[in-house]
Image: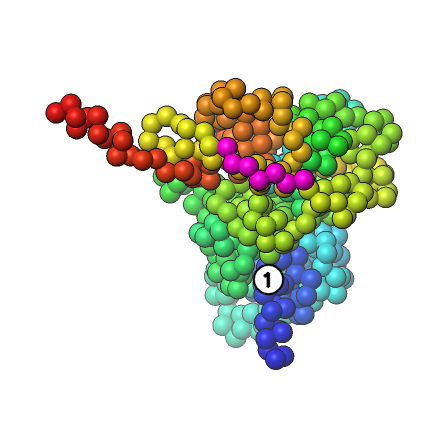
Amino acid sequence: MMTKKTIALLATALAFSAPLLAESGKDVYSKVCVTCHGSGLAGAPRYGNAADWTPRLAGGMAGLYQSALKGTPKGMPAKGGHLTLADADVKAAVDYMVGAVKDAAKLAKAEPEAKKEEPKKPEPKKEEPKKLEVKPTVAPAPVAAVPSMPVAEAASSGAAAAAAGSADANSFNRLLKPASKRNLPPPEDGIHDPTNDGTHALQPPLAAFGALPKSFAGNRINWVEAIGQKKINPRYDRNDPKAEPIVMDLNIVREVKGSMPDVVYPHKQHTEWLDCSNCHPAIFVPQKGANQISMAAILMGEKCGVCHGKVAFPVSECRNCHSKKKDMAKVASPADAGK
Amino acid sequence: MKKLSKLRAGFLAGLIMTLLAVFFVDINEAQAEYGDVVINNYSDGAGMRPVVFPHWFHRMRFRCKVCHADLGFKFKAGGNEINMVKIIDGQFCGACHNGEIAWSVENCNLCHSGKPNTPTQVHESTVQKLAQPTGAPKK
């Protein structure tokens, strides 16, 4: 019973990028700090590396706490960018990392300088500058990004590998955004200004996406399903939480050229979110056959592309729309007849 | 002595790594969330950071209809000519960001949180990707 609860709690904590339930310095380290302090990303003092830590320890623990809590000009973000962490948790993480160095120092005394030469000792430190891709994003699995997060360390080592790989001209899938770059927290997403205090107060996407159904594109969230499964219930009226959407259940089938399956446009899923006036008549004339739609137009942000490819799932998800199978035999028969 | 120079070298290396990392993150392409809208009609000119609007956060709380039908937001990044006067008069963002439904306008930096000089855009939009494929060298 207890164990089950604990596991559930842990899983939750892992799934969320800001570990609210962290119990110990080690927890905080392995969930947050390891991103930079594991590999020395951006100059972060590496866990267990005495050479990295010694100069920093000179200022005493109070100085280290201060750096960890408030950040440093060198790149350490306040609380490692996780402003939701309790001060005590951050300090515990610092203690944990410092503890590891002290252990290492003892060993080093026994076995002279050798230790310092080993750069690859994963140990803790205080939190560091931007933790690029760490986060609960599992490297390869796009869909499972959030839930399958048990091995924080594996993720971070994968992330480090991805970072190293990105510099390689012949790396795999040069044009593809790696899983480690998805759903980054605001300070690391490249658009928000990390020097802005407000940026650090914003919710990281993964903290919100944990329980939502996944998809393969966009935010990697299946928003339609999220409403369907009642994981979210966005308001239909600004003020009235009880207002119900006016849902219209009418499918429109559009026959398309070539071998592509015909498009089935479902009013139902659209009216769950939108009002008729959002699309009619400005974007779509509400009359059969009156709308010329092409993939080129959609790609350029017109017609369906007003939303699809910006906030709704993008055109890469062909089958979501092109879902009605054609009778291919009909196409084949005239050729046969010609023989 | 030797130790000192080693330390110094370590420092230097750390500094360089930091710089590289900052450089890397800043210059390299943005990895913001799909649908995040940057609005920079007037911000840069006014010495404020551009606004970043997170679609994902808002769609979890409101259906599209609330903003795009009731409040009159056009489906066009930067197309609404929003300014602070309109907001404090209760239009656009101000319909909710009024201290009643959502936090109020004094929290400047929560919205004005973009990197300076970021152009108005729907981040990760297909159009953006077509014009500038991910991972392509920028210079």
Label 1: element kind: helix
Looking at the image, residue A285 lies above or below residue A6: above
Residue A23 percent location from the top left of the image: 67, 70
Magenta span = A246-252
The foreground one among A85 and A16 is A16
Residue A113 percent location from the top left of the image: 51, 65
Which residue occupies 87% across, 29% down? B89
Quadrant including the N terminus of chain B: bottom right
Which residue occupies 69% across, 35% down? B65
Tag 1 subunit: A
The foreground one among A263 and A287 is A287
Can residue A88 be seen here? The reply is yes
Label 1 CA crowd tier, 10 Å (few <14, some 14–19, many 20+): many
Residue B22 percent location from the top left of the image: 60, 40
Residue A89 horizontal side relative to residue B34, left or right: right
Residue B56 horizontal side relative to residue B95, left or right: left
The residue that label 1 is drawn on is A14
Question: In the rendered image, which quarter is residue A18 located in?
Answer: bottom right
Which residue occupies 72% across, 34% down? B67
